[in-house]
């Protein structure tokens, strides 16, 4: 969550990096509407969380009206303060996210995704096209969720899941450094 101006700048930079951009340029407003959407999402988060003066609250109302228009145009229903830094929205299309969900850093999300309930999604998660996540599930870090999967149970770290309902189809070893030696273990 954005708590100050430095966080706001960090989130903007992380979102740009996730979309392979070095900086936001004027023409991106029209040539990359998803990037503009994410930029406005972060701006709303900043003004909502950090700025409480009357002028800022009025500006926040204007931002929210613009944001709703962009959301309808792109097909996104993404409320503020759900995604951490490094959000990467891959395509236009229907993305619906519940306001009670929390998603970690560096999430890549595709179209036709629905995240319902109070899902808790870790860092470095890839959410393929058509994925449905519902219930109060916890999805670990470094997880890949295959296209059209339905996730209704908790998912551990370092795995790939797919299917209806989603099942682990591949797990990756966790590497730890203990006394200077790399030690691999499975989940």
Image (cartoon, rainbow, N blue to C red):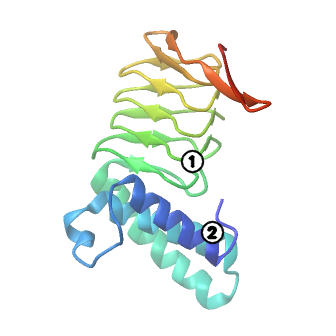
Q: CA distance from mark 1 to mark 2?
A: 13 Å
Q: Earlier in the sequence, mark 1 or mark 2?
A: 2
Label 2 secondary element? helix
Quadrant where the N terminus sits is: bottom right
Q: Position of residue 146 (x, y in %)?
A: 40, 21
Tag 1–tag 2 contact (CB < 8 Å): no
Work out whether residue 107 or residue 53 is closer to the camera in this orientation and state it: 107
Please tell me whether residue 17 is drawn above or below residue 156 in the rendered image. below
Location of mark 1 (residue): 105
Q: Is residue 137 above or below residue 126?
A: above
**Residue drawn at (45%, 59%) of the image:** 15
User: Is 112 on the left-hand or right-hand side of 127?
Assistant: left
Q: Is residue 173 left or right of residue 12?
A: right
- Residue pointed to by mark 2: 7
User: Residue shown at 69%/87% (left/top)?
Assistant: 53
Label count reads 2
Q: Residues within 10 Å of mark 1 (few under 14, many from 20)?
A: many
Quarter placement of the C terminus:
top right
């Amino acid at each position: 969550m954005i708590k100050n101006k430095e966080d706001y700048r960090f989130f903007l930079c992380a979102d740009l990096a996730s979309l392979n951009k070095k900086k936001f340029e004027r023409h991106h407003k029209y040539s990359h509407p998803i990037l503009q959407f994410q930029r406005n999402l972060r701006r709303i988060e900043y003004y909502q969380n950090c700025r409480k003066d009357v002028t800022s609250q009025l500006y926040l109302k204007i931002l929210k009206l613009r944001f709703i228009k962009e959301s309808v145009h792109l097909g996104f229903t993404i409320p503020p303060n759900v995604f951490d830094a490094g959000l990467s929205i891959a395509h236009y299309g229907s993305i619906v996210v519940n306001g009670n969900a929390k998603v970690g850093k560096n999430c890549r999300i595709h179209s036709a995704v629905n995240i319902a309930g109070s899902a808790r999604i870790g860092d470095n998660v890839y959410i393929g096209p058509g994925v449905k996540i519902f219930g109060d599930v916890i999805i670990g870090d470094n997880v890949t969720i295959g296209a059209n999967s339905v996730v209704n149970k908790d998912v551990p770290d370092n795995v790939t899941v797919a299917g209806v309902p989603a099942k682990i189809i591949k797990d990756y070893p966790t590497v730890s450094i203990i006394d200077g030696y790399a030690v691999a273990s499975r989940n």
